[in-house]
Image (spheres, coloured by chain):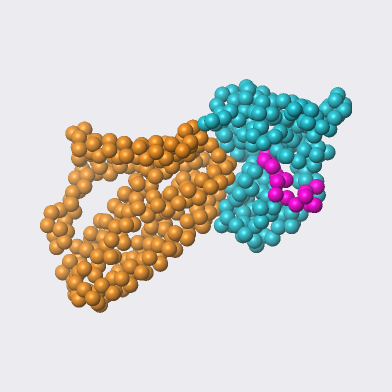
Amino acid sequence: MSDVIRMTNVTKKYIKQTALKDISLTVPIGKIIGVVGGNGSGKSTLLKLMSGLSLPTSGSVTVNGEKANRKTGKVVSYSSELSSFYPIFTVREAMRFQASQFVDFNLAKAEEIMKLMRLDPHMKVKALSKGNRGRLQIVLTLAREAPYILMDEPLSGLDPMVRESIVKGMISYVDLKSQTLIMTSHEVAEIETLIDSFIALKDGSLLKMADVEELHETEALRIADWMKKAYI
Amino acid sequence: MRQWSALFIKDFKLTRTVFFIGLVMNVLIAMLTLYMGRVADDSLLMFVPLAIAVAIHVVYVPLIVFIDLKSEGNHLHLWLNNPQPAYKLLLSKIANGLMMMVISLTMLYALSRLLIEPNFSLIEPYWTDTWRMGWFIFPHMIWISIELCTWVMVLWAIYQYLKLKIGRWSWAVVAGAAVLSEGLNALFKTSDPYRYVTEWGGITYQFPTILSEPIQTFAGGYIYDFIIIIGLFILTAWLVDNKVEG
């Protein structure tokens, strides 16, 4: 069994659009990977396919050698860009609910991240601001000790003043010996110093997948500058 | 077990508002019955609202499960990312609906007893049959409610599957599928093969003081319905596990 997420010639079509076109890539364990691209480039669809929440129109997605489907949820911790959770729960109840459903959910770790995120454990999810709902998503996703952590726009809705410290905090909770974190973000500059590799998408096609170091060395450019050049 | 009980509590919380509204409506119906008892002047008519309230409970489980599924649909990725097999996720919703239905019916029964006590003379001649009929109706209502519920679940799953394929027309297709399947089902129930398959193991229920004709059911009919229920449930679970996308 290979501990990787592998996409082979994956195309995903919706009713009126093709979200991803013929994507082939491999994601190993032990990396922090940023998925970058403009609006509608297919970032969210890419994560959904990797998490088994979405199914490819053609091609194949495998996680640890098995076809990605609903069962993939056992090894993939996924958070949506919608930052939504059951509004009926309080923050602590939400954590306990996740702990009851996922064997790899570490409740002590969740409490720790919750404190870092300065969330009130007694607050109802429905009463949380958009930013705090985003923080709760981070807590619930990172507290799982799953091999793959997929976060769709985890920084959106967060205050720009605290964003950097939260991102650094997030990274400190990822164990790179056994986990890979893949996150999409519009804020390329804010994640560039933290990520090892990046996947750049444009109009559903894979533009580049490379190590950040490699980009710095070969093109002497930061990701944001490379994107400006590549996306023209 | 901890996993499933947490799911059950979550499903209860998602639907409890409707449940509590239902209980309040039961009290209002009891009050209406009381009022009718005064204006209808010692007539059996006073029990009509209660009888209607009991009959409406046949759609209780499908309604609760539909509300629950609709709520899940607002953040489908959450529900689908749960690693438990779909049959467990769905069973939790049916069990929650059933529990609520039984509590609501029990409450109606308790309220009926309170209302009947002072007017017992009105139904005294029919009491034994009324009591027996209650025991006949109660499990049959649960049975029909579960069957309707499995239809609701399969249609919801088909809708979720189709909405990413054909978009806004998916409701129309689902409505068409519902009408067509009901039509075919009704047609089949008038056919000889249906009678051949189901009309064995006859059970006769007699309520002579209430109904002049006995009610006849068949063990074959129950088995036929059971197969339909299980078939629809398996189809729904398969659709959720393999076709619905979050």
Give yes or no for residue A160 being in the magenta stretch.
yes
Residue at 18 percent of width and 49 percent of height: B216
Chain A colour as displayed: cyan
Residue at 28 percent of width and 71 percent of height: B33
Tell me where the magenta segment starts and ends, as one range. Answer: A145-164
A74 over B140 or under it: above or below: above
Give yes or no for residue B240 being in the magenta stretch.
no
B149 over A14 or under it: above or below: below
Residue B107 in view here: no
In the rendered image, the quadrant that contains the C terminus of chain A is top right
- Residue at the farthest left position: B212
Residue B88 in view here: yes
Toward the viewer: B138 or A21? A21
How far across and down, in percent of the image, does residue B142 sit? 33, 53
Location of residue A48 by image quarter:
top right
Asked whether, in this view, residue B9 is left or right of residue A65, the answer is left
Asked whether, in this view, residue B51 is left or right of residue B14, the answer is left
How far across and down, in percent of the image, does residue A1 sit? 66, 27
How far across and down, in percent of the image, does residue B232 sit? 38, 39
Residue at 20 percent of width and 40 percent of height: B200
How far across and down, in percent of the image, does residue B97 sit? 42, 54
Chain B colour as displayed: orange
Toward the viewer: A208 or A68? A208
